[in-house]
């Protein structure tokens, strides 16, 4: 019997685990892939306080994991298939049928890249279509690439891709970027980046060797054109990983978990933290804040003070 089980090992989950372990709660963290979550696939992080020169996503993830396990957090790899409730005891079943019992749960499952759902996206996934510049950028030395989206991810990863690529087209559906100003300034100043405004991708085309071109349409003029690119990096937002919850806690209209300011969900003893939670700002800095709050809330819940 655990005091708390944390599902998801990104910054929110690892911080929750740091706090619950330091509170001497018997704590287990279950992670499906690798700890660090989306940070692990981020090349460079420069808006997380305490690292004035910035820090690589991989290093930051490893530091967070080491810090939490130092205080006793157990981490296992596994994919949660089901959660059932029996009075105050919560039972978690993994896909391999392993079961764990716990008094409280912290949901920190984050979100996954949202697909564009255009022709060619699935066909060329892994053969030129990518959702991770850090993972795949180096395969495209001196090539022309397209990045889809106008948010922080698209611009930040587009800038990263200029280390390898000859040209990076950033295709955005409006005439103004959503990304934070400092990233915009860098993109405008980078000669390898070419912004393609008011345009949406329609089709990714290629052959046996992978992607050869991206078909786009200007939504103001209806003009269609084709960009000769070998890679298409898609950054059009994220979907929360809440499908496995099957009605266990209340979600909002976009399937993010609704919590109060203590990270409590609609079900007593179940808390949520990080990108999986409905909130205005999704950053590493806000994820760790959520994790700390959820960890302390779980402690209070177990002590009966909640
Ligand atoms: P986002 O902020 O939701 O931006 C998604 C972008 O994709 C928007 O520009 C959107 O256009 C565009 N888009 C959405 N659906 C589209 C479609 N079907 N076709 C074409 N374009 C489409 O997502 P994100 O950039 O991944 O960021 C997610 C969160 O993480 C944000 O809170 C962000 O601040 C944070 N983040 C922060 C950093 C950082 O601080 N360094 C880095 C990465 C991410 P519109 O603008 O027209 O809606």
Image (spheres, rainbow, N blue to C red):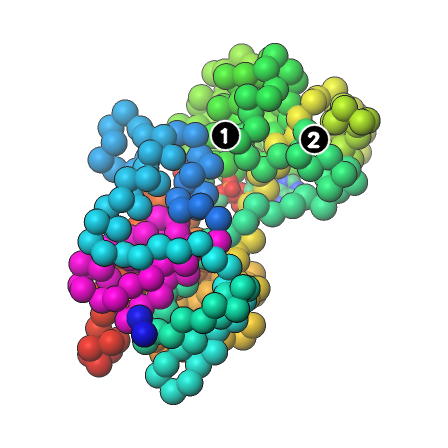
Q: In the displayed image of the protein, which residue is found farthest to the bottom?
A: 87
Label 1: which secondary element: helix
Residue at image location 18% in from the left, 64% down from the top: 24
Extent of the magenta region: 3-32
Label 2: which secondary element: loop
Q: In the displayed image of the protein, which residue is found farthest to the left?
A: 23
Task: Mark 1: give few (<14), some (14-19) or many (20+) Cα within 10 Å.
Answer: some
Label of residue 134 in the image:
1
Task: Mark 2: give few (<14), some (14-19) or many (20+) Cα within 10 Å.
Answer: some
Magenta stretch contains residue 8: yes
| Relative vertical location of residue 110 with respect to residue 63 in this rendering, above or below | below
Residue at image location 40% in from the left, 71% down from the top: 100
Please name whichever residue, 23 or 95, is drawn nearer the observer in this view of the structure: 95
| Relative vertical location of residue 63 with respect to residue 243 in this rendering, above or below | above
**Image quarter of the C terminus:** bottom left
Q: Which residue is mark 2?
A: 127
Magenta stretch contains residue 87: no
Asked if ligand 1 lies within 8 A of label 2, the reply is no
> Residue 257 placed where, x, y %?
46, 65
Asked if ligand 1 lies within 8 A of label 1, the reply is no
Q: Is residue 223 visible?
A: no
> Residue 174 placed where, x, y %?
62, 36
| Relative vertical location of residue 229 with respect to residue 62 in this rendering, above or below | above
Q: Is residue 136 visible?
A: yes
Residue 293 left/right relative to 45: left
Q: CA distance from mark 1 to mark 2?
A: 15 Å
Please name whichever residue, 262 or 141, is drawn nearer the observer in this view of the structure: 141
> Residue 18 placed where, x, y %?
24, 54
Label of residue 225 in the image:
none
Earlier-in-chain disc, 1 versus 2: 2
**Image quarter of the N terminus:** bottom left
């Amino acid at each position: 019997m655990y005091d708390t089980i944390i599902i998801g090992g990104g910054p929110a989950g690892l911080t929750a685990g740091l706090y619950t372990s330091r509170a001497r709660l018997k704590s287990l963290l279950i992670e499906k892939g690798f700890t660090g979550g989306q940070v692990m696939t981020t090349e460079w992080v420069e808006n997380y306080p305490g690292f004035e020169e910035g820090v690589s996503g991989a290093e930051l993830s490893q530091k967070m994991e080491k810090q939490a396990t130092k205080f006793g957090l157990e981490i296992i790899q596994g994919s949660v298939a089901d959660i059932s409730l029996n009075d105050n005891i919560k039972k978690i079943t993994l896909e391999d049928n392993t079961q764990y019992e716990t008094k409280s749960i912290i949901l920190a499952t984050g979100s996954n890249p949202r697909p564009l759902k255009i022709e060619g996206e699935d066909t060329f996934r892994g053969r030129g279509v990518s959702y991770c510049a850090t993972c795949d950028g180096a395969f495209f030395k001196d090539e022309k690439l397209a990045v889809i989206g106008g948010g922080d991810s698209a611009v930040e990863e587009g800038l990263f891709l200029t280390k390898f690529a000859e040209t990076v087209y950033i295709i955005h559906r409006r005439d103004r970027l959503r990304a934070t100003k400092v990233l915009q300034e860098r993109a405008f100043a980078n000669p390898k980046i070419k912004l393609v405004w008011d345009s949406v991708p329609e089709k990714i085309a290629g052959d046996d060797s992978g992607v050869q071109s991206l078909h786009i349409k200007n939504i103001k003029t209806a003009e269609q054109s084709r960009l000769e690119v070998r890679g298409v990096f898609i950054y059009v937002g994220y979907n929360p990983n809440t499908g496995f919850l099957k009605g266990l806690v209340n979600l909002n209209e976009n399937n993010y978990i609704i919590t109060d300011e203590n990270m409590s969900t609609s079900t007593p003893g179940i808390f949520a933290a990080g990108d999986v939670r409905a909130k205005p700002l999704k950053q590493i800095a806000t994820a760790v804040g959520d994790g700390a709050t959820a960890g302390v809330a779980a402690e209070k819940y177990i002590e009966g003070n909640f």
